[in-house]
Image (cartoon, helix red, strand yellow):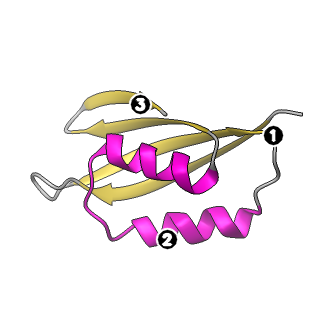
Amino acid sequence: MQIEYNFRIDCGCPVDYLPDFYEVTLFTTKTIPAEKILEIVKSFSSDYMFQEDLTQKLQRLFNCKVISLGTHSGIVTKVTA
């Protein structure tokens, strides 16, 4: 069984402190309660971090493949961990 979870995380850029928006997809074979995902999303909402660091943190927290699609100042970046 392959499961995909899609959600959005809003963080701040650690360079210019402007908001960044990340569309995240988790790829897993295990069920992840929506409440757990929402808890993590909320915990990152006041943080300032680079997309690459955020994607790696999510990969470690959920122990699965993670793809994030981020927009910063009109530049779209895709990161896979």
Q: Do the residues bearing badges 1 and 3 touch, measured as CB atoms within 8 Å?
A: no
User: Can you tell which mark lies on residue 29?
Assistant: 1
Circle 2 Cα neighbour tier, 10 Å, few/some/many (<14 / 14–19 / ≥20): some
Question: Can you give x and y, in whole percent of width and height, for residue 32 in the image?
Answer: 76, 56
Dot 3 lies on which element?
strand
Marks 1, 2: nearer the viewer: 1
Q: Earlier in the sequence, mark 1 or mark 2?
A: 1
Q: State if disc 2 and disc 1 touch (CB < 8 Å).
A: no
Which residue is drawn at the image coordinates 49% and 71% (left, top)?
A: 42
Tell which circle, 3 or 2, labels the residue nearer the N-terminal end.
Answer: 2
Q: Are marks 3 and 2 in contact (CB under 8 Å)?
A: no
Q: Position of residue 47 (x, y in %)?
A: 31, 66
Magenta segment, which residues? 33-62
Which residue is label 2 attached to?
Answer: 42
Would residue 37 be found to the left or right of residue 2 on screen? left
| Circle 1 residues within 10 Å: few <14, some 14–19, many ≥20 | few
Viewer-closest of 44 and 62: 62
Image: 81 above or below 57 = above
Q: Is residue 16 magenta?
A: no
Residue type marked 3: Val
The amino acid pointed to by label 2 is Lys
Residue at (25, 61) in percent of width and height: 48
Q: What distance separates the C-alpha of mark 1 from that of mark 2?
A: 24 Å
Between discs 1 and 3, the one toward the N terminus: 1
Q: Give the SS element for disc 1.
A: loop
Q: Nearer the viewer, residue 56 or 42?
A: 56
| Residue displayed at 9% across by 53% down | 16
Pointer 3: what residue? 79
Instruction: Residue type at mark 1: give it.
Output: Thr
